[in-house]
Image (cartoon, grey):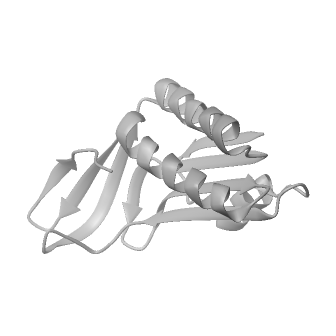
Amino acid sequence: MHHIHLSETPLNIAQILASVQDDSCGAVNIFVGTVRNTTVAKAVLRLEFEAYPAMALREMEQIANDIQARWNAASVAIHHRTGSVEVGGIAVVIAVATPHRKASFEACEYAIDTLKTTVPIWKKEIFEDGEVWVTPHA
């Protein structure tokens, strides 16, 4: 089962974790991406995320399908914020439930790495003296 979502409101880790719980699985791995306060020695005030929703959701669903096929995942959740996210705020949560821990770790890492390079979600860093769109990277 997949739980794919874009949200303009804060992400709830407990709800996302609960959405992937499965009695057939011995492992749930969660990745939580937060907004840090500096980048390249510049103070970050906040991040702003924009997405092309139809395509972003489709690409996120494809990542979940790949994970299910490759790592035998029972459940995958990929939730990403849009709009403004303050320093310390949660930008993305990925949760993967698999029968065994190694697969869960690998699948979660694959999900965030692939999301950052294939999903049309754009990130702008806001500083006191300006702003910059960030190029996707692994």
Observer-nearest residue: 86 or 35?
Answer: 35
In which quadrant is the N terminus drawn? Answer: top right
Residue 129, percent across and down? Answer: 8, 64
Residue 110, percent across and down? Answer: 50, 48
- The residue sitting at 79% across, 60% down in the picture is 18
Q: Is residue 126 left or right of residue 73?
A: left
Name the quadrant containing residue 88: bottom left
Q: Is residue 137 left or right of residue 112?
A: left
Q: Is residue 122 above or below residue 27?
A: above
Residue 127, percent across and down? Answer: 17, 65
Q: Is residue 100 above or below residue 138?
A: below
- The residue sitting at 55% across, 26% down in the picture is 58
Furthest residue toward left = 129
Q: Is residue 58 left or right of residue 19?
A: left
- The residue sitting at 13% across, 74% down in the picture is 41
Observer-nearest residue: 70 or 62?
Answer: 70
